[in-house]
Amino acid sequence: MEIAIRLTTAPKAKPGPENLGFGRVFTDHMFIMDYGPSQGWHDPRIVPYGPLSLEPAAAVFHYAQAVFEGMKAFRTVDGRVALFRPRLNIERLNRSCDRMCIPALDPDFVLQAIKTLVDVERDWVPSAPGTALYIRPFIFACDTVLGVHPAQTYKFLIILSPVGSYYAQGMNPVSIYVEPEYVRAVRGGTGEAKAAGNYAAGLKAQQTAVAEGHAQVLWLDALERRYVEEVGAMNVFFRFDDEVATPELSGSILPGIVRRSVLELLRSWGVPAVERKITIDEVYTAHAEGRLKEAFGTGTAAVISPIGQLAWRNNVISINGGQIGELARQLYDTLTGIQTGRLPDEFGWLEEV
Ligand code: COI
């Protein structure tokens, strides 16, 4: 399929790197493609970024049949633009689509669409340390009937946003609230899909966490409220003495691409890195015994985000004295080093635009 390109006649001023924050500014163009029962996915186009016109009855507003992805394009030290493991995001997008009854996309075509859009917006890829061009592909249902069933019409869009740190604190360790009551997802539900509704379900707990001075929520499993699952916008890792552990993918946890890359990096360094069940009691016991050395979140948006403090049922613990841990620092430096071409791409993770 040929991607039609219509360029803006009113390009926006690009923001400086200082106050980018996360996902507040959008580039000049976006990608759109439609799906209908007879044409399949069709009419791919890049057009000026702007509002969409949708009927109030559009299914996405009522029943949340919507999925998304998050990935980044980086400016390398020698001025190239590279995507980080984009095929893994595209595979996950199709798995999310399958879970939400959305028709699959051709992975090669999605990669072509992302590359074409990023190429059009090449000048928007920032180069300051810690910045990137965040890529947000998303798909939603457009049918205009109120019956509950998988839609027959969809839109697939890609928008781009130059970003700095996800958290206002940057890479400084954050405080995380262990949610005792609400749950994010249950096995058999949509937790392992990147479904829009998962994030809506998490807002109530996040609101409480933020009101109490924490950055985000750590979710426990839905059945027993014992097993650690993930943090609001990240997967989570703990370093118990010299073993690094992250919750195993149980069906309710998002299979993060940075999570996977961190496991691969650690194993390549000879650090024992395991995926297994972790109870919140184990975390607190290890802390009491002096064996909890570090905790950190991983995600595309947040990269590596050290956890300086955990609060669970009024029991607040400080991890690594609230300082950035040695492993978290090393992982951050290595990942961003590979992403920006400061370090060799030994694993073949970059895909140049
Ligand atoms: C990402 O890390 O890219 C995500 O999609 C998390 C997001 C909800 C900010």
Image (cartoon, rainbow, N blue to C red):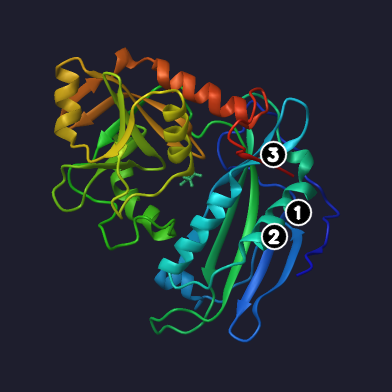
Give the SS element for disc 2: strand
Instruction: Read off the residue under disc 2.
Output: 31
Question: Could one spot residue 130 in this view of the protein?
Answer: no
Q: Amino acid at mark 3?
A: Ala
Viewer-side residue, 208 vs 104: 104
At label 2, counting other C-alpha atoms closer than 10 Å, the crowd grade (few under 14, some 14-19, many 20 or more) is many
Q: In the image, is 312 to the left or to the right of 68?
A: left
Residue 34 location, x and y as percent? 64, 73
**Residue 297: quarter of image:** top left
Residue depicted at 25% across the width and 57% down the height: 186
Q: Relative to 134, say whether 244 is above or below.
A: above
Labelled disc at residue 82: 3
**Residue 32: quarter of image:** bottom right
Give whichever of discs 3 and 2 has the lower sequence position: 2
CA gap between label 3 and label 2 equals 19 Å
**Residue 45: quarter of image:** bottom right
At label 1, counting other C-alpha atoms closer than 10 Å, the crowd grade (few under 14, some 14-19, many 20 or more) is some
Residue depicted at 28% across the width and 45% down the height: 205
At label 3, counting other C-alpha atoms closer than 10 Å, the crowd grade (few under 14, some 14-19, many 20 or more) is many
Q: Amino acid at mark 1?
A: Thr
CA gap between label 1 and label 2 equals 9 Å
Q: In the image, is 46 to the left or to the right of 208?
A: right
Q: Amino acid at mark 2?
A: Phe
Q: In the image, is 76 to the left or to the right of 5?
A: left
Give whichever of discs 1 and 3 has the lower sequence position: 3
